[in-house]
Amino acid sequence: MTIIGNKKDIAEILASSVQQAKIIGDERAESYALGSLGEVYEHNQQLPEAQDLTQQALFIAQKIDASDIAYRLEWQLARLLKAQGNIPAAISAYDAAVTTLQSLRSDLVAVNQEVQFNFRDRVEPIYRQSVELLLQEKGQGKPDLDKARQRIEALQLAELDNFFREACLSNQFMVLDNVVDRDNPNTAIFYPIILDNHLEIIVKLPNQRLMHRTSTVKRQQVEQLITKIRETIVEPDAHQQFQAVSRQLYNWLIKPVETELKNSKVNTIIFIPDGFLRNIPMSALYNGKEYLVQNYSVAVSPGLQLFTPKPLAQKKLNVLAGGLSQPPKNEKFAPLPNVKVELKSIQKSGISTTILLDKNFTSTTLAKTINAQAFKVVHLATHGQFSSKAKDTFILAADGRINVNELDSLLKSREQKRTEPVELLVLSACETAAGDNRAALGLAGVALRAGARSTLASLWQIGDNSTALFIDEFYRQLMTGKTTAEALHFAQLKLLESPKYNRPMYWVPYVLIGNCL
C-alpha cells in the first residue's frame, strides 16, 4: 500500500476500484482498495476520513479472514490513532497487528519471495513503533516493560523465521528471568532497543523489578557508531579511535545503570542485542579505563528464553573436533595452518577427543561420527560465513560447503537417535559476511537451528596463533568446572594480559550465544 504519484488522481482511481470491487463482489479487492484510499487520506493529513476508510477495509478483511491484508490495516489504524492523540487505542491497534502477524508466522515467509526483501519495510516497523508507544505510556504500572521486551523478542523471532523462510523455532525454552532469580543471582540481563529517536535499555537484575533507562539519540547515530566500532576494532592502527567510539556506546548502554550493577554484585551479563548491536561483541565496551570483559563475563541470547540450563559435566566432557587446514581448491579461502595445533590442544587438555582433520573432515564423515556417540561438544575449526541470508551461511568441509540448513539436518539426525542435544557448538574460524549489516542474524540462526544449548563463535577471522592460545585456555577452564561464560571470560583475559595479543581485535571476536550458565 505504498502511495506514489498525484494524490488526487490516485484517490479517484481507488474510489473507482472500490465501486468496481463492490459490483463484482470481490471483497478482497474492495478491502485492499479502501485501505489504500485510507492511506492516501493519511498522507494528506485528513485523519478522521482516513480512519473511517481504514476501519471499513479492516472490517471486510477480518470478515473474509484475509490476515495478510488485515495486519497492515491494523498497523495503518494504529498510526492514525497515534497521530490523533488516542494512545491507548493506538496501542491496542498495534497489539492487534502483532497478533495477526504472529498468526501468519508460517504463511508470511511462504506467501511470496518478496516478503523477505520487504521485511524491513512491512513488518519490522510495526514492532518498533509499537515498542516506542509502550515505553512512552504514563500512569500506574506504566510503562509495561515486560510487554515491551516481549514485543522486541517477537520481532527477533520473526526475523529468524524470515531468515529461514519458515516458522522454525519450536524448541522447549525456559524463561531467562526465572533462571536468573532462582539459580543465578549473580547474572543481569540487558535488553538494548534501538528506536528512531532513542536508545532504550531494559535491565533485569537478580530478584529485582525491571529497570528502564533512555538515551536520547537518533537511530542513524547509533548505527553509524556501531559501524565505526566494527571498522576500527580490526584496524591495528586505530586503537585510540576504537576506544573513543566504544566508550561512547558504553556511556549510552552501561553507564546509566553502572551503580545498580555494582551494588547488585553481578558478575555475568547476558545481552539480548537488537538490530545493529548484534554486529559487535559487547565485551569490548570501554569505560575509559577498562573493558567490560575485565569486570564481567559476557554472553548473548537471541531472546528472553533459552534452553533449560544444564551445566557441562566436565568430568565426562567429550569433544568431536573437526578441522580443515587446507580449503577445497574451488574455494577462495586462505589456509589455516594452526588448525592441527588447535585440535591437538583440546586433546592435550585431557578431554576425550575424536578428531576429523582435513580429508577426513567431510559432511558424510561428520554425519556418521556425530551419530556414533553422544558428544557433549562439537568443535569445528574451519572457515565459515554468517550472512543475513540462509543460503550464504555455511561452514567449509573437505567436500564443500555445509549450509546452515544442512548443519541443522546433520545435528537433528543425531537428536533423533539420542535424547541429549549437543551442549556446546564451537565455530572457531568463522566470520560475518563483508558489507552485510545483518550478518550476525546468521550466527543467531546457526546457534538456534543447530539445536546446541550454546554456541561459541568468532565474528571475524583472527590471527591463527591467538586462536590456538584462546582455545587452549577455554577448554582448560571448562575442565576446572567453570561455566561456558566463565571459561570464555578467562580465555579472553588470558589474551588481554598477553603483550602480544592484548588488542581487542584478538580477544574480542568470540561471542557466546545461548545457555552460558
Image (spheres, rainbow, N blue to C red):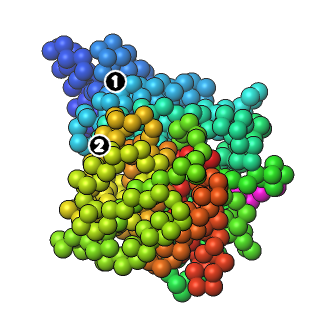
**What is the secondary structure assignment of the residue under circle 1?**
helix
- Looking at the image, which is closer to me, 84 or 284? 284
Looking at the image, residue 396 lies above or below residue 403: below
Real-space CA distance between mark 1 and mark 2, rounded to the nearest whole angstrom:
32 Å
Upstream in sequence: badge 1 or badge 2: 1
Residue 353, how many percent across, how many down? 44, 59
- Say which mark, if any, is on residue 515: none
The magenta stretch is 254-259
- Which is more foreground, mark 1 or mark 2? 2
In the image shown, does 68 or 79 lie closer to the viewer?
A: 68
Does the image show residue 131? no
What is the quadrant of the N terminus in the image? Answer: top left
User: Is 354 positioned to the left or the right of 517 in the image?
Assistant: left
In the image, taking residue 245 as reference, residue 94 lies left or right, namely: left
**Residue behind mark 1:** 67
Total numbered labels: 2
Residue 274 horizontal/vertical position (percent): 53, 50
Residue 363 vs residue 236: left or right? Answer: left
Residue corresponding to mark 2: 409
Q: Nearer the viewer, residue 88 or 280?
A: 280
Q: Amino acid at mark 2?
A: Ser
Q: Is residue 356 visible?
A: yes
Which quadrant of the structure image shows residue 58?
top left
Residue occupying the point 71% across, 43% down: 184
User: Looking at the image, is 517 positioned above or below residue 145?
Assistant: below
Amino acid bearing label 1: Ser
x and y, in percent, of residue 197 in the image:
59, 52
Characterize the local packing of mark 1: few (<14), some (14-19) or many (20 or more) Cα atoms within 10 angstroms.
Answer: many
Main SS of the magenta segment? helix
